[in-house]
Image (cartoon, rainbow, N blue to C red):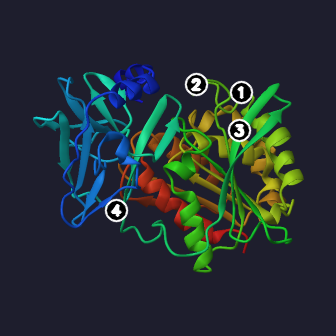
């Protein structure tokens, strides 16, 4: 996360929201052939004051009412707003203020997909108060923009699964923790036991990131409706055991014991899952990809499928996990039960490239059959959404 924005997000977003809510509001003129993001109850801010508004050509108009502000700027970690390539934080164009104090900017056209954004109002980062769709991450909250036209993850008229926030007590950490769980359409009315897919998020995210930003539930809905994937339960645990991310201790902290001793037993006790290797898969992006390796390599007998998205061995070929698990890496019996070992990375992903290369080298040296992919793009959700859509149909065959 950009250090400047990390600091700015320390300002209470709720306080900022209350400040903006007291300001006079005016109806923003909706462009022709446009679609507002979800109805945001705009009457609180003036009739018709929707934001964002997606135009027919996929340009997007953002509005915010702040008569006393001196400068308002659009920011996003997911789509490029200012030209050039900047990962994680894009400081975009400034909004223009009209006589009634409404700031407006139109950007794009943007590619179809789901993106995060915020407004930088006189140096204070705030969500779009006219838009109820948001995502939390390790450092704050961001608004969500949905640009339709991405067939594999658009919200379609198909049966939809259920997403739940589930609290469990971690005996490993001695406190309550949260996970997000997707159950497929018809689960609540059924009796059948289902396979389970553990899906891990990245360093900047939370347990809900694969849903709020990754659109995982709609990707699964569409795959299941098209009979491209089996109905399955998807468990998305919280990847952080503290309030900060420390790459140096990852894989050697208490996350793996929490996963093995608390998350998996909770799921197998409280959900109708098939508790065996053939019906258990794991995958993760970035930090979650490294955590996937830290969990799965020492416990190959637990998983029939492993996916690593934009990640690898953070410590290179000399990663302690490799040295500590040489016997498992060289065990031919364990390899036979591993049906899928799938990796993918964007060709412009300079962040994960060294670890990804080290991972592939180690796995191939130890005789693993790896289905590896190099795609367009960089270290971003645009790729991870696609990777989930490509990986999931391979599971539980």
Q: Earlier in the sequence, mark 1 or mark 3?
A: 3
- The label on residue 34 is none
Q: For the N terminus, which image quadrant?
A: top left
Residue that mark 4 sits on: 112
Residue at disc 2, secondary structure:
loop
State the separation of the CA atoms marked 4 and 2. Answer: 33 Å
Q: Earlier in the sequence, mark 2 or mark 3?
A: 3
264 shown above or below 182 = above
Q: Classify 10 Å Cα crowding around label 2: few (below 14), some (14-19), many (20 and above).
A: few
Residue at disc 3, secondary structure:
strand
Indicate left or right for 314 with 164 as reference.
left
Residue under the point 21% across and 54% down: 108
Residue that mark 3 sits on: 178
379 shown above or below 91 = below
**Which one is nearer the viewer's eye here, 376 or 182?**
182
Residue under the point 41% across and 42% down: 143
Residue under the point 27% across and 27% down: 121
Q: Position of residue 213 (x, y in %)?
A: 48, 49
- Is mark 1 in CB contact (under 8 Å) with mark 3? no
Q: Toward which corner of the image does residue 174 lie, by quadrant?
A: top right
- The label on residue 253 is 1
Q: Position of residue 389 (x, y in %)?
A: 53, 65
State the separation of the CA atoms marked 2 and 1. Answer: 10 Å
**Residue 212 seen from this side:** yes
């Amino acid at each position: 996360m950009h250090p400047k924005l990390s600091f700015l997000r320390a300002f209470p977003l709720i306080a900022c929201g209350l400040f903006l809510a007291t300001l006079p509001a005016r109806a923003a003129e909706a462009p022709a052939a446009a679609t507002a993001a979800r109805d945001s109850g705009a009457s609180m801010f003036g009739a018709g004051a929707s934001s964002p508004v997606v135009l027919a050509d996929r340009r997007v108009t953002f509005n915010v009412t702040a008569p006393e502000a001196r400068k308002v700027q659009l920011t996003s970690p997911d789509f490029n707003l200012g030209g050039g390539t900047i990962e994680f934080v894009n400081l975009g164009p400034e909004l223009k203020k009209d006589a009634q104090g409404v700031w407006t900017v139109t950007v794009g056209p943007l590619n179809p997909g789901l993106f995060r954004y915020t407004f930088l109002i006189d140096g204070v980062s705030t969500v779009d108060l006219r838009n109820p769709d948001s995502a939390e991450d390790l450092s704050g909250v961001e608004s969500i923009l949905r640009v339709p036209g991405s067939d594999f993850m658009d919200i379609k008229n198909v049966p939809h699964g259920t997403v739940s926030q589930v609290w469990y007590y971690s005996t490993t950490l001695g406190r309550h923790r949260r996970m997000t769980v997707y159950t497929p359409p018809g689960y609540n009315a059924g009796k059948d036991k289902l396979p389970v897919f553990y899906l891990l998020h990245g360093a900047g995210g939370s347990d809900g990131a694969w849903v709020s930003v990754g659109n995982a539930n709609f990707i699964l809905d569409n795959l299941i409706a098209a009979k491209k994937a089996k109905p399955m339960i998807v468990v998305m645990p919280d990847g952080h055991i503290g309030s900060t991310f420390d790459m140096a201790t990852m894989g050697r902290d208490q996350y793996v014991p929490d996963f093995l001793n608390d998350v998996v037993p909770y799921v197998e006790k409280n959900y109708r899952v098939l508790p065996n290797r053939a019906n258990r898969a794991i995958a993760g992006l970035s930090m979650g990809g490294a955590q996937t390796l830290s969990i799965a390599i020492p416990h190959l007998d637990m998983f029939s499928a492993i996916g690593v998205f934009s990640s690898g061995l953070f410590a290179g070929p000399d990663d302690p996990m490799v040295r500590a698990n040489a016997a498992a890496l060289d065990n031919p019996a364990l390899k036979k039960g591993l049906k899928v070992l799938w990796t993918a990375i964007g060709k412009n992903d300079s962040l994960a490239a060294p670890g990804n290369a080290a991972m592939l080298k180690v796995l191939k040296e130890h005789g693993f059959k790896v289905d590896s992919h190099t795609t367009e793009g960089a270290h971003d959700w645009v790729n991870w959404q696609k990777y989930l859509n490509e990986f999931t149909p391979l599971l539980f065959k």
